Amino acid sequence: MMLLATIREALATLRLHRRWTALTTFGIIWGTASVVLLVGWGVGVHGLVDRGMQKVGKNLVYVMAGRIGEDLTPAEERRQLDFDLEDVDAVRAGARHIEQISADVAMWLPARRGALLRIVNVRGVEPAMRDLRGVSLAAGRFVSPDDVRFQRRVAILGEKARERLFGTRPAVGQPLTLYGQRFTVIGVLAPVGAQLSRDGPLIDEQVWIPVTTAIVLVPGTRIGKMVMRPHAREDNADLKREVRTLLAKRLHVSPTDEEAIFILSMIDYLSGFDAVFTNLKVFLLLLSVATLGIGGIGVMNMMLVAVNARRREIGMRLAVGARRREVVAQFLVETVVITLAGGIAGLILGLAACVAFGMLPGDLVPRPVIVPGVAVAAIVITSAVGVAAGVVPAWQAAHTDPAESLRTE
Amino acid sequence: MTAAGSLIRLRSVHKTFDAGGAPVHALQGVDLDIERGEYVGVMGPSGSGKTTLMDILGFLARPTTGQYEFDGCPIDGLTERELAAFRGERVGFVFQSFNLLPRLTALANVELPLLYRRVPGAERRRRAAAMLERVGLAARARHHPNELSGGERQRVAIARALINRPSVILADEPTGALDSATGEAILDMIEQLHRDGQTIVMVTHDPSIGARVQRVVRLRDGRIDVTA
C-alpha cells in the first residue's frame, strides 16, 4: 500500500518535472545504447573480417613449390621446383592431419564463345576444391572424380566469368572454347562476393576445369600449388610439419628450406587478426565505459540538483511524520523508475541500432552482434550510478534535523 | 492543573548552532510550561529564538542541553521511529510559507500525515475530505496548490495539521504571508479551534494578534523575557 502510493507519487513527480526527467533519462538512454551498439559493432567487425577472410575457403593452408634456397645451393643450380599429381596423392595419403586437399593449377587462357573472346583465369582443380573453397553451385554440377580420371573437357564458371562470357544467356550445357579446345559448361558457382583474402583473382572471376585436363591442355603446365585444410585449427602446426617433411623427401630438398617448399597458412593470419580484434574490442569497451561514465556523471548531476532543490520537501515530510527511511525510499523509487526506464529504453534503442546496421546492404558492412552480458552490465551500471546519486543526498538530507531542511531556501 | 501535568514542559533548554565555527546560542536556558487547551503567543524580535523554540516543541530539532517532556514523556529517550510518530501524531505544524507539496492535490496534501501512519487509502481519503470540508475547502479538494489562493493554501495546511487530531497546533506566523483580510479569516479559524479545546502555540510579530491570545511568551536573546 505504502509502496504503491510511493510509486504513484514518484510518477507524479516525474510527470511534473518533465524536462528534468527527460534530460536525466536521456543521459541513461545514451549511455546504454552506446555501449550496446559499440560493443556489438566491435564483435560484428570481427565477425565480418573473419567471414571475409574465410570466403576464399575456411582455414586453408597453401603449399607452393618454389626454388631451392640460396644458401643451400650455388646460384646456377637453383631450379624451379614443381609438384606432380603423385606428389599430391602422396600428401593426401601420408599426412594424417589433412581433412581435404586439392591440387591447384592456375593460368590465364583465352576463352571463346562464338565470336566473343575473353581472357580468363582458369584453375585446374580436383573435386575436393568445392569443399575447400566453401562454394556452392547456382546451377549444374561440380567436377567429379571421373572428370578428373578421364581428363574430361568440362568447365565450371564463377559468377563474374559467366556474366562476361554468357551475359544473360543460359550457360550450363553450352559449349565454350578454352585455349582452342572445346569444353562444355557443366556448372555455375553461386556468387561468393567480396573476399578479404584471395589467391589470384576473385573466385567469382575464375573458370574451373579438372586438374588433369588442365595439365594436358597446355603443354608444360606444372602444379604450382596444393590447397589443403587440417581437421581442426589446432592441427595447423602439425600439418605444416608433416607436409614439409613428406614433400622435402620426395623433391630431394632440405626440410628446413622454406624457399623450396613455401607454406602459407590462413590460420596463422587469422590468429594474428584475433589479437588485433581483441585490442579493438577492449578499446570499444573502454570507450563504452567512458560514455557510460559521462552519462553517469550527467545523471548524478541531475540527481544532486534535484535532491537539493527538494530539501524543503524532505523536511516537510519528516515534519508530518515520515520516517527517514520512508523519505529515502521515495527517492529510491523515483531514481529506480528513471534509471530503469532509461536503461530499458537505451537497451531497445541500442538493439534497434544493431538490427538497423545489420540490415544495411553490402558485403563489407559489419553486422553488430548483441552481447547480452554487456547490455545487462550497461543497465546495471547506469542504474547504480543514478540510484546512488539520488539516494545518497536524500539520505543525508533525511539525517539532518528536519528544521534545518525546512528552512533551506 | 499542576506543572507536572503540563502538556509541554521545557527545563533550561539550550540550543546552540555551529555557524561556520562561531557557535550561535539560539536558546539559552528556556523554562516553559504549556497547559492543555492553552492559546499561547510567542513574540520577540528577529533572532530571539522563536523559530528555534517552535522547532524544538515540534520535535524538528533536539535541544543541545536541557529537558523537554511532552505529555509527561521525556523526548530525550525517544528513538528516531518514535520521534517520527510524535511529529506526525502529537503536533500539527502550520508554517508561514504553507509548505504544501506542489504536485499533490489539496486532498492528497491533507492525506500525507495519514499515509505515513499507514492508514488505508479509502479511510485516508474520507478523513481528508471531511477535514477539507471543515476548513471550508470541500470544493477545492482536487485542486493543486498553485491553483489556490494564499488563504486557501493556508487552510489546506491547517487541515493537514489537524488531520491526526494532534495534542497541539504549532503555528509559525501563519498569517505572515497573507493580506490582512485573509489573515483575519485564518486567525478566526485558529481561534475557533481554540474554543473547541485545541491547544495552540503561535509565533507572531503582530502586537494586535498578540493581544488576542491567552498568554504571551516573550523571547529576547534566547531567553524568556519575564520583565515584559
Image (cartoon, grey):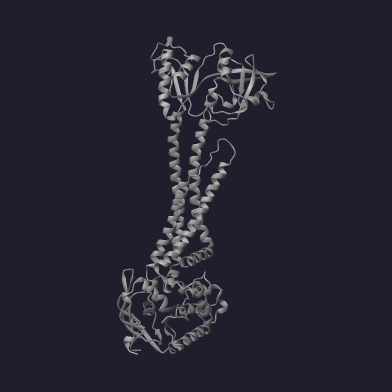
Residue A48: x, y in percent? 52, 36
Does residue A348 lie above or below A244 as drawn?
Answer: below
Q: Is residue A69 visible?
A: no
The picture quadrant where one finds residue B52 is: bottom left
Q: Residue at x 43, y 9 (%)?
A: A77
In the image, farthest residue toward the front: A146
Residue A242: x, y in percent? 41, 21
Does residue A1 lie above or below A140 as drawn?
Answer: below
Residue A331 shown left or right of residue B105 in the figure: left
Name the foreground residue: A177 vs A382. A177
Residue B97: x, y in percent? 47, 76
Q: Quick one: quadrant of the C terminus of chain B?
A: bottom left
Does residue B178 lie above or below A38 as drawn?
Answer: below
In the image, farthest residue toward the top: A76
Q: Residue at x 40, y 70 (%)?
A: A323
Q: Is residue B79 visible?
A: yes
User: How many numbered marks does the figure carry?
Assistant: 0
The picture quadrant where one finds residue A125 is: top right
Q: Quick one: quadrant of the N terminus of chain B?
A: bottom left
Residue B144: x, y in percent? 54, 72
